[in-house]
Image: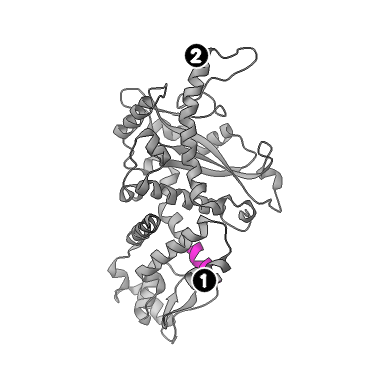
């Protein structure tokens, strides 16, 4: 029951976010007249190839899927033709989100979902892909930059630093954690060496994530070739330049992120002590590494939550680089995982005692 409530709330938010102004359905639009003139002679709603449109029959009602049109084009076409477009009805957004969530939650074939949703597998594929494109187009900016989060104010950064200090962090100005994540993929037919990771002994795509103490993945960069090292990905992502603008305060102080030894110790990224044969670690340094590693373990649960919720992304044989847009799939999974954290929290929020933002506030 709780899971269904979460799904319904997410569907409501997506529906409200897309709600088009009534003017799009008005008859005074010149573009609407152009669309009307081009298709007014048709007795049925506009349909073409499988890539553009299809006709869906639901309870005896003819509902046109204007898959090849933008939202204004779709609204105008439906108005002039006098049909109820399936894409323009509120039920589509909830059902589309349900189909997408069911598709991502576990490895499954589209044929297996026909019984659940009473729809043809080709239709389920189009709806799932369309919802992925829509969510990515509307909300992917939340993963591209920390500046996209209006709630991430200097006051909130100081709250994060105090929270981590109270949880045992040895640095007084750490406000989050940075880590690289490798996602296994099916072996591609070309450029196999580019995505092969000698460390993981498999073909992978790498992502760079920033986890905040409130359980939100604040920024996601990637994908990068599996052979890339975390330090090289950091340079390619341009993160340091953004931290220069975001983390430096007016009084000259700054905040930092904490990462694993794969990164270099620098102004905005701190790491633990590295052990070597010439300079073995002291007891104090070992205790420092142990305390900081305890914090990073709980943050790893936050990164793992994405795969825990959307196991489909962990099914290597279906992660085909040349046939699917794996980046958009993973981005959408992270966005939905953040939404889940806003509604129900996570292990990260419970450990640090830091509440996530409200769902509407996060999607704003």
Q: Which residue is mark 1?
A: 115
Where is residue 363 shown, x and y percent of the image?
Answer: 35, 50
Residue at which label 2 appears: 284
**Residue at screen point 47% across, 25% down:** 292
Query: Can you see residue 140?
Result: no
Q: Is residue 245 magenta?
A: no
Q: Residue 297's spot in the image, x, y percent?
A: 49, 33
Q: Measuring from the top left, give residue 301's x and y in whole percent.
A: 48, 39
**SS class of the residue under badge 2?**
helix
Among the two numbered marks 1 and 2 on one chain, the one whose residue lies closer to the N terminus: 1
Q: Position of residue 178 (x, y in %)?
A: 48, 34
Q: Tell which of 315 and 272 is nearer to you.
A: 315
Which one is in front, 87 or 232? 87
> What is the CA distance from the residue labelled 1 to the residue labelled 2?
60 Å
Q: Residue furthest front?
A: 1
Residue range corresponding to the magenta coloring:
122-130
Principal SS element in the magenta part?
helix
Above or below residue 249? Residue 334 is below
The image shows residue 51, relative to residue 247, as above or below, that is: below
Nearer the camera: disc 1 or disc 2: 1
For the N terminus, which image quadrant?
A: bottom left
Name the mark on residue 124: none
Secondary structure at badge 1 equals helix
């Amino acid at each position: 029951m709780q899971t269904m409530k979460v799904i319904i709330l997410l569907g409501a938010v997506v529906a409200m976010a897309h709600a088009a102004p009534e003017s799009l359905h008005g008859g005074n639009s010149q573009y609407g007249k152009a669309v009307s003139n081009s298709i007014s002679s048709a007795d049925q709603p506009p349909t073409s190839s499988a890539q553009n449109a299809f006709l869906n029959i639901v309870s005896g009602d003819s509902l046109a899927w204007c898959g090849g049109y933008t939202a204004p084009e779709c609204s105008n076409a439906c108005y002039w033709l006098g049909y109820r477009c399936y894409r323009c009805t509120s039920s589509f957004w909830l059902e589309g989100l349900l189909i997408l969530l069911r598709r991502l939650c576990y490895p499954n074939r589209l044929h297996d979902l026909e019984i659940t949703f009473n729809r043809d597998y080709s239709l389920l594929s189009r709806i799932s892909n369309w919802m992925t494109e829509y969510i990515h187009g509307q909300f992917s900016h939340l993963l591209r930059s920390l500046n996209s989060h209006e709630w991430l104010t200097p006051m909130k950064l100081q709250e994060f630093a105090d929270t981590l200090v109270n949880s045992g962090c040895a640095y007084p100005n750490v406000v989050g954690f940075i880590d690289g994540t490798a996602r296994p993929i099916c072996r591609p037919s070309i450029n196999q060496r580019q995505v092969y990771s000698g460390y993981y002994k498999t073909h992978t795509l790498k992502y760079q994530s920033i986890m905040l103490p409130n359980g939100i993945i604040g920024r996601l960069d990637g994908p990068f070739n599996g052979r890339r090292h975390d330090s090289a990905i950091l340079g390619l992502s341009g993160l340091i330049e953004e931290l220069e603008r975001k983390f430096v305060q007016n009084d000259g102080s700054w905040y930092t992120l904490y990462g694993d030894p794969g990164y270099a110790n620098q102004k905005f990224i701190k790491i633990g002590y590295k052990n070597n044969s010439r300079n073995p670690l002291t007891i104090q340094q070992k205790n420092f590494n142990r305390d900081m590693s305890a914090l990073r373990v709980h943050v790893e649960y936050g990164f793992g939550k994405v795969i825990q919720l959307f196991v489909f992304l962990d099914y290597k044989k279906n992660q085909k680089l040349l046939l699917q847009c794996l980046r958009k799939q993973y981005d959408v999974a992270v966005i939905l995982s953040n939404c889940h954290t806003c509604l129900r929290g996570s292990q990260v929020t419970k450990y640090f005692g830091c509440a996530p933002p409200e769902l509407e506030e996060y999607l704003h």
